[in-house]
Image (tube, rainbow, N blue to C red):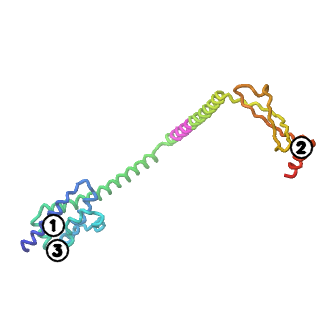
Amino acid sequence: MSASSVDSLAVKRDRLLADNVDPNDREALLRRRAMIDHALAELDPNAVLDLSAPLSRKNHEPLDNLMHLADLDRQELDVYRTEYPDWWRLARQSTEETRNWRRSRRERWAQLREQQAELSTDMRSRAPHQSHQGALWTAVSLAWRSVALGGVVSLAVVISLAAWLVLRSALKVDPVMGRERVWLQYGQHKPPYALVQLDQRKYSTPGKVYDVDLELVVPVNSNNLELGNFMATS
């Protein structure tokens, strides 16, 4: 291999290592691992080829400055392994780290299944009297909560009623019902009108609210015949 080819590989190596990836950044490590796996698959038949990892340069701009390991031939990979052992160790380390993630998830799932099985076994192994005691305690607890909730609702109703009484007393609302007759009068060449005159002795108490029903009375006489005819036909 010519010196220029080795130099170009060094430039590519530097670009890859210049992309500082946080060891705790799982997505970044997955992207790097996918690129490295493409290279390892060309050299190591036991390497894991992860084609599902994101390699789109549209979604990950840092990939624009990285080398494409899948484009390297076997001779170039040999140069990487012999001339740049640090990079090769990084490749193997990245692959092992991501493998450990998958193993950790499987172990955690197995632990959860074991805990679930232990819990089910413990519940089935309870004595009958213990189960009865648990059911009794549950019933007592529900009854107590129901009583407490009913007390809260009752207290809210009492407070609302008391507030309404206080407000009513403050406004001094005491309606007085009344019924008055209003005589409709009809003047010469004037529209009919009603003069309402209420008895001041009946409706003059301060702080009172009056509800008066006014009854309209139309006297039948010669002066109101025209009005009566009008009202009867309208």
User: Which residue is found at the position 31% from the left and 67% from the top?
Assistant: 52
When the figure is inspected, residue 29 is found, relative to residue 49, above or below; the finding is above
Quick check: 69 left or right of 165?
left
Location of mark 1 (residue)? 12
Location of mark 3 (residue)? 73
Residue 13, x across and y down, in percent: 15, 64
Whether residues under marks 2 and 1 lie with C-beta atoms below 8 angstroms apart, the answer is no
163, 140: nearer the viewer: 163
Toward which corner of the image does residue 184 lie, by quadrant?
top right
Residue 168, x across and y down, in percent: 66, 30
Label 1 element class: helix
Q: Which residues are magenta?
A: 132-145
Toward which corner of the image does residue 71 lie, by quadrant?
bottom left
Quick check: 3 left or right of 168?
left
Quick check: 137 left or right of 230?
left
Which numbered mark, 2 or 1, is in the foreground of this view?
2
Report the amino acid beneath label 1.
Lys
User: Which residue is found at the position 12% from the left and 62% from the top?
Assistant: 85
Residue 223 falls within the magenta-colored stretch: no
Report the amino acid beneath label 2.
Asn
Label for residue 224? 2
Quick check: 144 left or right of 101?
right
Toward which corner of the image does residue 148 lie, by quadrant?
top right
Which numbered mark, 1 or 3, is in the foreground of this view?
1
Which numbered mark, 3 or 2, is in the foreground of this view?
2
157, 34: nearer the viewer: 157
Q: CA distance from mark 3 to mark 2?
A: 120 Å
